[in-house]
Amino acid sequence: MRFLPKSSGFSRRRFLQMSSLTAAGFGLALSAHQQNLKAETTEGIANSRVQFERALQIGTQAYIWGYSLVVLKRTLRRLAVMQGVPLNQFSRAERLATPEDKINFFLNNDTLYANAWLDLRQEPIILHVPDTQRRYYNVQLIDAYTNTFAYVGRRVTGTKEGNYAIIGPAWQGALPGGVKEIKSPTNTLWCIARTLVEGEDDLPVARALQQQYTLTPLSAYGRGIIPQREVPPSPLAQAETSNGLQFYDELGAALQDDPPPEDEYPLLTRFGQVGIGLNRRPSQEIQDQATIDGLKQAILEGERLIEQKVSNLPTTVNGWTVTYKPGNYRKDYLLRAAMAKVRLPANTAEESLYFTAQVDANGNPLSGANQYRFRFDAGRLPPVDAFWSLTVYRLDRTLVANPINRYAISDRTKGLQYNADGSLDIYIQHEVPMGKESNWLPAPAEGFSLMLRAYQPRAEVLSGAYKVPPVKRV
């Protein structure tokens, strides 16, 4: 398992050796009684150091392992409190994202979003989806540890009408006829639905389809549709993590409803050696100061390792960065924690990949003070089976207000002008490119970033064989 390097190596023997050398260095002549007292004191200090080191190592492991669980629970609580996302029901956006949405999360301008927080402790929840007439959509199911464990949607189940029973890990029983089973690894899960919008004229049709996504408890199935709420288009309200021992308290509470797979129970046994575990509250229960100090240091060490992993996640080609391993992390707990920190929720790569650029072909930061041309050569548009889009963001990760209300250029953008050789030029700048307005992607006056989305990417994208072309200053 990939948790962290070994602890500092400040062993008990080394500590005793250093203590004796210190005494000798000062030429202390101790009586037999004084020597006994010194030995007892030294032994106590050494034991405290051993306890500190153990708490540091185990606590760091527990922090990394439990990070995604705590962050997801905090995120869902924040969705419930701040945005009114109800339990076991969809809250659905009625419009596409615009610059008015100040959530700094790279909101897309391609899909309508719907969110639901499911609790499967009592009974299964039945997801109904309509026939979308080949329109792209997906319903992503994310377990309590942030693993995407299933999809309902165009890529996996097609676009026909269907009913799917999402069941908890311990539930047993019979399902109604025609209902397909999806077993969740945890009782808590996050359900996120995305519906492609072809353009502003298509919004009413997409909205009508989205209204037909429903979630119904098994006991109420067949008794009519439960009304679903409407909320602003925000796919995420990610919670901040705490640097206090309360993190471990939250982990202990989260484990009550969502224990890990059985093959990870030995980890819980190990965590219990320093007071971390199911329904444990280390911030209140632990009295040993060395253990407390070790756990506090463990949080700092865990954060350092997660941040280090975050910095090593992307692959960079032509100034574009991409992470090829999002969505399902298996036993790579450090990767899971890193993705929970910066990319929650993350589609699996097979569903979508995201290429981000903040620099041009020469490595200089993108700025609205300059003019850029982004060219797809003939036959080299992103190879996808669903859609692609190129979006401009401010450095605070919000969309850019502009006079033509265009926030992205995509395979659905009307009126794009192709060159005689079949290539496509996109002009990214703050001022209107005279004579090239049809292919203008407005940028802010200051620094900005770009994101190229590739939904249902083909094999050459997934393998890295397809290279996104560089952004060139003109």
Image (cartoon, rainbow, N blue to C red):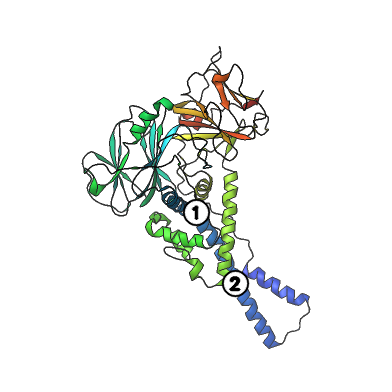
Label 1 Cα neighbours within 10 Å, binned few <14 / some 14-19 / many ≥20: many
Q: Which amino acid does label 1 sit on?
A: Tyr
Count of numbered labels shown in the rendering: 2
- Identify the disc placed on residue 4: none
Q: Where is residue 436 shown, x and y percent of the image? A: 58, 18
Q: Which amino acid does label 2 sit on?
A: Ser
Q: Which residue lies under the disc numbered 2? A: 48
Q: Is residue 431 visible?
A: yes
**406 or 69, which is in the foreground?**
406
Q: Can residue 198 be seen in this view?
A: no
Q: Where is residue 338 shown, x and y percent of the image? A: 53, 47
Element type at mark 1: helix
Q: Where is residue 330 shown, x and y percent of the image? A: 45, 47
Q: Would you identify the image quadrant in which residue 377 lies? A: top right
Q: Would you identify the image quadrant in which residue 204 lies? A: top left
What whole-number distance in Å separates the C-alpha atoms at marks 2 and 1?
A: 27 Å
Tell me: 286 left or right of 365.
left
